[in-house]
Image (tube, grey):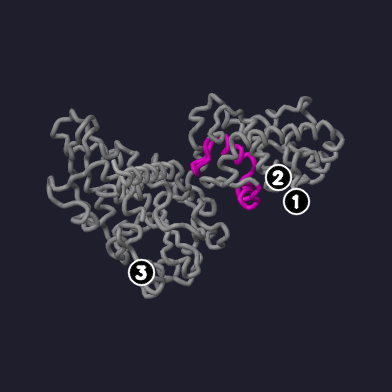
């Protein structure tokens, strides 16, 4: 076995161990909470925390993932503030009509600084959903 | 209350030597235990552990009271704190002594008033091993929370009044003593680790438990049985963004997938899924709508493909095997229509 494969195997082993370590210490966040921080902190605001539990009490999955066009993969959606103000994505409801409007920055941009984007709350499956 | 505290400070001063001896002894135990079992994580702040001497992190954890902190240390928390710091040979009193040591080192003082039934618990701050500098409140709520006057021998075990939750959690014969306490689940936004506690906006957000306590419970995920909540009309999520009256046209078709090995076969109920989702959410990108065209394995699901696109992230997680693997192998073929899982989850 070449040295390169050895190193690669060791790397994979470390990754797997790390994955298990992460799984053993789930974030205390609510299951299926999503942190969006692709742009937030670069633009000088806190990351966005999206709570699936709160929204699924009020809307079926289909409303956002079909009507609003959110792809079912964390990280696959490019949501810009300009779009929201234009009434797309979150802005379909967050318009001071159905839900609070885009002027209430700190209600959505409520995450801890430095958080990475992705799904929080003790998810058990990996894949694209983990960014 | 204040006069009572003053009284006990005076009493503490009167019994000065005994108390200081006791407090030093206690501080010594705490330090030793800390160095042996806690420092591995708490020195560097590994896995989210509050660092020794970090006043900000410790004061945030002290807000719920020292009894809660003791309980978390003894029983562990889902946030990563292992029960007794992973050293199960420690006694509850030793763990509490280590907690006291770390709290003191952060300049905090265990709030003795937060200990249920511990109104009398107070001692001399002057006698503490490491009095915190610049914290006048500490005199009132002293670190060594112990009714010194009433215990003739300075044993550490008597530190918490018997009958406190901390005491109950460390009962060696307690049922499920290593499981995370249910009180730690569904924390409010300020304590969930992803919301910024310094953001005033989060106090306007609804705490999950406020909503969940009215809904049927489940064992995993949000610990809410969403399908049952919808079935019993305890929640009325809109099917259409603009039309609150719109109803989904649920499709009642069960797909049975026979599985290898001894696991019960999988029954996939379209009905529960179509009450939440549009056909195009799954077909054809995730599942080809054709019999036998989809290779599904638990490995793929764990990697976040197929069912794992939702299950394990937002729908009930894969630890709930029997919710999918719900049809016994020896069941007659005609039972395809009668779906145990579908009925149970209704």
The residues tagged by marks 1 and 3 sit, at their Cα atoms, a distance apart of 51 Å
Q: Position of residue B225 (x, y in %)?
A: 36, 44
Q: Pointer 3 indicates a residue of which chain?
A: A
Magenta-span inclusion, residue B43: no
Residue at the image position 49 percent from the left and 50 percent from the top = B210
- Location of mark 2 (residue): B109
Q: Are marks 2 and 1 on the same chain?
A: yes
The residues tagged by marks 2 and 3 sit, at their Cα atoms, a distance apart of 49 Å
- Location of mark 3 (residue): A92
Q: Pointer 1 indicates a residue of which chain?
A: B
Q: Position of residue B308 (x, y in %)?
A: 29, 47
* Residue B113 versus residue A86 in the image, above or below: above
Residue at the image position 13 percent from the left and 45 percent from the top = B292
Which is closer to the viewer, label 2 or label 3? 2
Range drawn in magenta: B53-82
In front of the other: A8 or A32: A8
Magenta-span inclusion, residue B81: yes
Q: Farthest residue in the front direction?
A: A2
B310 sits to left or right of B167? left
- Location of mark 1 (residue): B135
Q: Secondary structure at mark 1?
A: loop
Q: Position of residue B320 (x, y in %)?
A: 33, 39
């Amino acid at each position: 076995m070449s040295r390169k494969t050895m190193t690669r195997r060791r790397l994979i082993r470390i990754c797997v161990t790390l994955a298990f370590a992460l799984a053993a210490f789930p974030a205390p966040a609510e299951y299926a909470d999503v942190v969006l921080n692709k742009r937030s902190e670069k633009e000088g605001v806190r990351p966005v925390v999206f709570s699936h539990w709160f929204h699924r009490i009020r809307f079926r999955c289909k409303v956002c993932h079909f009507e609003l066009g959110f792809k079912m993969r964390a990280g696959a959606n490019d949501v810009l503030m300009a779009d929201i103000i234009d009434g797309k994505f979150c802005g379909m409801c967050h318009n001071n009509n159905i839900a609070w409007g885009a002027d209430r920055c700190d209600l959505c941009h409520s995450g801890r600084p430095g958080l990475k984007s992705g799904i929080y709350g003790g998810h058990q499956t990996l894949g694209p959903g983990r960014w | 209350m204040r006069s009572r505290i003053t009284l006990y400070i005076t009493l503490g001063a009167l019994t000065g030597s005994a108390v200081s001896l006791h407090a030093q002894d206690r501080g010594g135990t705490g330090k030793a235990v800390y160095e042996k079992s806690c420092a591995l994580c708490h020195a560097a702040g590994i896995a989210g552990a509050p660092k020794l001497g970090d006043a900000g992190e410790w004061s945030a954890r002290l807000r719920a009271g020292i009894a809660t902190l003791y309980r978390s240390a003894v029983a562990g928390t889902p946030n990563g704190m292992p029960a007794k710091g992973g050293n199960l040979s420690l006694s509850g009193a030793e763990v509490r002594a280590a907690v006291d040591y770390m709290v003191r080192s952060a300049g905090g003082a265990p709030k003795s008033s937060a200990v249920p039934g511990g109104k009398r618990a107070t001692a001399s701050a002057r006698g503490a091993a490491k009095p915190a500098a610049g914290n006048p409140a500490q005199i009132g709520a002293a670190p060594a929370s112990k009714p010194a006057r009433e215990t003739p021998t300075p044993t550490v075990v008597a530190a918490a009044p018997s009958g406190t939750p901390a005491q109950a959690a460390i009962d060696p014969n307690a049922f499920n003593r290593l499981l995370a306490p249910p009180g730690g689940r569904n924390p409010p936004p300020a304590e969930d680790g992803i919301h910024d506690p310094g953001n005033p906006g989060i106090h306007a957000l609804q705490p999950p438990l406020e909503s969940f306590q009215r809904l049927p419970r489940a064992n995993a995920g949000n610990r809410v049985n969403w399908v049952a909540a919808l079935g019993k009309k305890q929640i009325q999520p809109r099917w259409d963004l603009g039309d609150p009256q719109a109803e989904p046209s649920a499709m009642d078709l069960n797909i049975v997938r026979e599985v290898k090995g001894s696991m019960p076969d999988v029954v996939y109920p379209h009905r529960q899924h179509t009450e939440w989702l549009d056909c195009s959410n799954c077909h054809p990108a995730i599942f080809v709508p054709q019999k036998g065209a989809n290779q599904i394995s638990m490995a793929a699901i764990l990697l976040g493909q197929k069912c794992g696109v939702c299950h394990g992230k937002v729908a009930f997680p894969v630890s709930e095997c029997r919710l999918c693997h719900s049809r016994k192998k020896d069941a007659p073929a005609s039972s395809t229509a009668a779906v145990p899982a579908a009925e149970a989850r209704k």
